[in-house]
Image: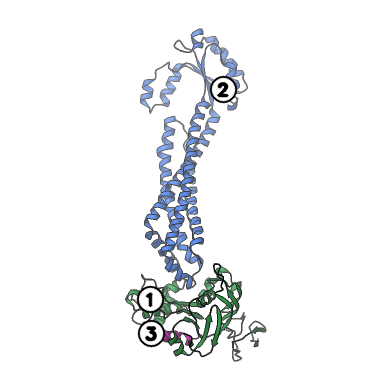
Chain colours: A blue, B green
Amino acid sequence: MRAQFVLSETWIGLRRNLTMTIAVITTVAISLALFGGGLLINQQVSQMRTYWDERVSLTIYMCTDKSPSKACEENGAATEEERTSIQQDLEALPEVQNVEYVTAKEAWEDFQDRFANNKALVEAAQEGDIPDNFRVQLADPTQYDKVQKTVEGRPGIDSISDDQQVLEQFFSLLDGLKWAALVVAFVQLAAAALLIGNTIRLSAYSRRRETGIMRLVGASNFYIQLPFLLEGAVAGLVGGIFASGFIVAAKFFLLDKIQAWFNFDITLTAGSVLSVIGVSLILGVLLCTVTSFLTLRRYLRV
Amino acid sequence: MRVDLDIPGCDPLYTVDWPRGRYCPERTECPLGPNLREPCDAPVIHFENVTKVYPTQKRPALEDVSIDVGKGEFVFLVGPSGSGKSTFLRLVLKEEKPSRGRVHVAGKDLARLSNWKVPHLRRRIGCVFQDFRLLPNKNVFENVAFALEVIGKPRRFIRKVVPEVVELVGLEGKADRMPDELSGGEQQRVAIARAFVNRPQILLADEPTGNIDPATSIGIMKVLDRINRTGTTVVMATHDAAIVDSMRKRVIELEEGEVVRDQTRGVYGQAY
């Protein structure tokens, strides 16, 4: 009897304020989706960081006949001696873990493999566009500068590129996205809280007859307030469920696409997506219930 | 009058100042269980030098009021508007706190009653108002049952008790009518049934005949009298001189927040 009564009152409240309920659900869904999206990006970035920290390398491009840079024009294509001496010097450095020499042909084949799913890119490139190069694996990625200085300016070297620099740009883009998502999420959450407060207030007002009588005949405060709290909780939960849908969609259609494009073999596990969804759902329900409770304390005198 | 009470099995000797109660030596069991804190017919409502000043007003709504209402009494509370009748009723319900003085209701010191226990106090008090306060979308049965539903009574109990009370107030055969299909007098009977269905110790009625014509009012008074005869204390605030005169019950008159008259078998008074 108790449960049935409370649930039917909750349902009546939600239905009577249908437009407000929809507004609450929408705001909660959007804010939680952004919040969850921020968390997802955060996890993605930190996973990629650890992944790349292990693999970060310098690429030293050697001069070819076609190299347009000044250094190469003066000395012409790199000679065999220049190549070996550079390799020996690099291998002597304690900061260097591994040096690999990649010929133009290998580089081109590798490129074709990597971007096999991007035909236009593969067709536009030709063998020799990527010159012979050294891939230098660093033992400690922070020692990049020191390694670069030892070989910089040596004859036969066209240019040195640092993977980490490229990655950092990408990471800062993702970081920016994350913060934008979180800021918008919190603004939206605040708006959601205000909306919920208002909805519950309206609901309490439209049922003031019932609650007045309940109070008079000695219904407990908990019993009077429970339908309103559940009303908030249900709205929060439904909003959270929609947000979970958005989060899953964002994972499959956005993050996975980005990964496919950049050809990273790190994807977020189902577990981490689930944990983000869990956090969002709990946050949604808590936010709505607590706001309802605070509103009731002001507007439903018991 | 001071009364010593020593009933076997109850709390040991308990003495109270007891201006209006009667000691009943024939009583041998503890009327309120083994932890009896009061004599068997201690006042159910006890006001001791109660003053109530509302924050926005200078003049007190009640000033130094001491009233005792015994178990099973029928009391009229009379006086012009603003004389403090409603404040008295609100203090009994603990909707307001007295500025000074003590209020005891049903053996409880309201100042020491924590807020979360107030609902339990209100379950022992029934309330009837001038404007009936029925739920328009519920029929007679549902309106009365609502009072039991919201305090968590089981469905079987409700099905058994509600028809009895509906009959007691004289609405047999009308249990499935909606409030707007009933006359004012009948609506007030529903409100009384709702107030009484949980068998409260006290029934407070704030101008229950205020919206009802004199002929119908007599019927309402008969219902209240019937309820009073079951042992329920009835406190009724009213302006209706004819009713007060015809009932010949105790009359407490308030004026500007003070008790100016307290008669055991009184009339409304010549002044009005």
* Residue A195 vertical placement versus B133 (above, below): above
Mark 2 and mark 3: Cα distance apart in space: 107 Å
Mark in the foreground, 2 or 1: 1
Chain of the residue under the numbered disc 1 shown in the image: B
Distance, label 1 to label 3, CA atoms, is: 26 Å
Residue occupying the point 62% across, 85% down = B18
The span shown in magenta is B211-229
User: Is B261 covered by the magenta stretch?
Assistant: no
Q: Mark 3 points at which residue?
A: B214
Identify whether A186 is placed above or below A153. below
Locate residue A246, reporting x and y percent: 41, 44
Amino acid tagged 3: Pro
Quick check: marks 1 and 3 in contact, CB under 8 Å? no
Q: Are marks 2 and 3 on the same chain?
A: no
Q: Residue A255 carries which label?
A: none
Identify the chain of the residue marked 3, using the numbered disc in the image: B
Q: Report the amino acid beneath label 1.
A: Phe
Q: Mark 1 points at which residue?
A: B141
